[in-house]
Image (cartoon, rainbow, N blue to C red):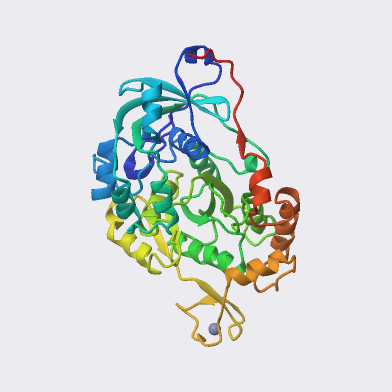
């Protein structure tokens, strides 16, 4: 039998019930959940968050925040919680030990075996996760929007999401990632976390990381691959639209900037918390569960504003090196150097005064105007895919707008099920 091993040597969690068992769900109390919770149910059930099998109970939250580990000593950095208003808990008459049916978008999604209903101080949760209580931090804001009570317990997916184009081409469960890597005969897989349309600086980072991850293996037989794993979740106005991110990253391989056999693109449903160092640890865990052996970490990984210093995340990863089941690959931000006439960086290029940084802001303004950036900055085929995806999916813009948020096609649909309500 094939084995699927994830973070800290744990077997990949698989809590997905086969289709066609609606009958068993009849008469269960049904509770609707919002998008954030639905996404996390999917990630938990397929094992993206192995070894977690459900939403955290109080003991798990406490040890995550205070010890950065689960009660059994497994490294863990971000609380994964299910929140509900106290009034709802009384209205539904929920008690520890009950099992309920969770519903999303009018369809059942999961069974939820509640084992702990608890309070938690959201100031403390914020401060320990994000290192700040400042409401300007999006993660702190999110934590403060929790509805007062938390419920811990295992979830079992009863309705598998059906992903809509173009997501369907990029969706893989953790086990499917591991199978795909075996098929490609990749021994080392380096993960690239992204929420970006790639400029040449990103492309060079991935190429630098490939050599680091290949280590002492031969270079004339491909045994190392790059997994570009996009984060698909909560969007804010001004972000790249999800469709553009996936299609442009994939275009790099389609147009030969990466060989067919060294590169693939998938995504994970996750709302960025912008927790900087703690989120870097979380990303390392997540990609371990996808079968990766290496993970790229650049400057200010998963940071926001000036809340973290540029290399805080790399420092924390070094500190927990022994408890990670994946090797971090540390990188600097690339720049374009006119003297070297190439994309390079401060680690090696000595023309600091002449180097041109890739400015996200500048690139955005160019793309917003639909002007083709110079080849030094963006591959022409990537630009064409950005523009096409903007018109196909982004109501004319590769960036999230209010209009996009209001009219975007759902990422996935759930099958309608006939279930007798309680
Ligand atoms: Zn130079």
Q: Is residue 243 left or right of residue 270?
A: right
Q: Quadrant of residue 136?
A: bottom left
Instruction: Look at the image and tell me whether residue 53 can be seen.
Output: no
How many marks the image carries: the answer is: 0
Q: Quadrant of residue 49?
A: top left
Residue at x 70% of width, y 51% of height: 394
Q: Is residue 112 above or below residue 283?
A: above
Q: Is residue 162 left or right of residue 12?
A: right
Q: Nearer the viewer, residue 265 or 182?
A: 265
Residue at x 70% of width, y 71% of height: 373
Q: Is residue 19 above or below residue 45?
A: above
Q: Position of residue 194 (x, y in %)?
A: 53, 56
Q: Position of residue 186 (x, y in %)?
A: 50, 49
Q: Position of residue 30 (x, y in %)?
A: 47, 21
Q: Is residue 91 above or below residue 334?
A: above
- Quadrant of ligand 1 in image: bottom right
Q: Quadrant of the N terminus?
A: top left
Instruction: Look at the image and tell me whether residue 238 can be seen.
Output: yes
Residue at x 56% of width, y 53% of height: 236
């Amino acid at each position: 039998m094939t084995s699927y091993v994830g973070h800290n040597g744990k077997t990949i969690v698989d809590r997905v019930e086969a289709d066609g068992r609606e009958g068993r769900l009849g008469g269960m109390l049904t509770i609707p959940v919002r998008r954030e919770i639905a996404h996390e149910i999917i990630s938990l059930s397929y094992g993206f968050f192995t070894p977690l099998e459900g939403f955290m109970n109080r003991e798990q939250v406490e040890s995550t925040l205070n010890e950065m580990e689960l009660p059994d000593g497994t490294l863990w950095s971000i609380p994964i919680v299910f929140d509900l208003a106290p009034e709802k808990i009384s209205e539904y008459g929920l008690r520890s030990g009950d099992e309920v049916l969770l519903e999303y978008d009018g369809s059942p999604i999961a069974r939820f075996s509640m084992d702990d209903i608890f309070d938690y101080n959201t100031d403390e949760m914020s401060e320990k996760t994000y290192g700040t209580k400042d409401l300007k931090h999006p993660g702190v804001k999110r934590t403060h929007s929790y509805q007062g009570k938390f419920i811990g317990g295992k979830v079992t997916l009863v309705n598998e999401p059906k992903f809509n184009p173009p997501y369907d081409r990029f969706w893989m469960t953790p086990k499917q990632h591991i199978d795909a890597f075996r098929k490609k005969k990749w021994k080392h897989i380096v993960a690239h976390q992204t929420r970006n349309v790639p400029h040449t600086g990103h492309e060079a980072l991935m190429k630098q990381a490939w050599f680091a991850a290949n280590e002492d293996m031969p270079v004339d037989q491909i045994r190392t691959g790059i997994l570009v794993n996009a984060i698909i979740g909560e969007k804010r106005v001004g972000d790249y639209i999800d469709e553009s991110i996936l299609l442009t990253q994939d275009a790099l391989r389609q147009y030969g900037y990466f060989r067919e056999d060294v590169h693939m693109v998938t995504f994970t449903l996750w709302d960025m918390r912008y927790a900087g160092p703690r989120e870097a640890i979380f990303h390392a865990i997540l990609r371990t569960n996808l079968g990766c052996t290496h993970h790229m970490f650049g400057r200010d990984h998963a940071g926001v504003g000036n809340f973290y210093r540029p290399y805080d995340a790399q420092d924390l990863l070094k500190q927990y090196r022994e408890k990670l089941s994946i090797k971090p690959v540390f990188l600097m931000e690339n720049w374009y150097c006119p003297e070297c006439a190439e994309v390079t960086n401060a680690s090696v290029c000595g023309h600091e005064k002449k180097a041109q940084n890739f400015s996200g802001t500048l690139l955005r303004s160019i793309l917003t105007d639909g002007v083709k950036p110079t080849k030094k900055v963006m591959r022409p085929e990537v630009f064409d895919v950005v523009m096409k995806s903007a018109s196909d999916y982004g109501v004319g813009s590769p960036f999230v707008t209010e209009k996009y948020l209001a009219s975007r096609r759902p990422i996935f649909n759930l099958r309608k099920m006939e279930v007798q309500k309680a």
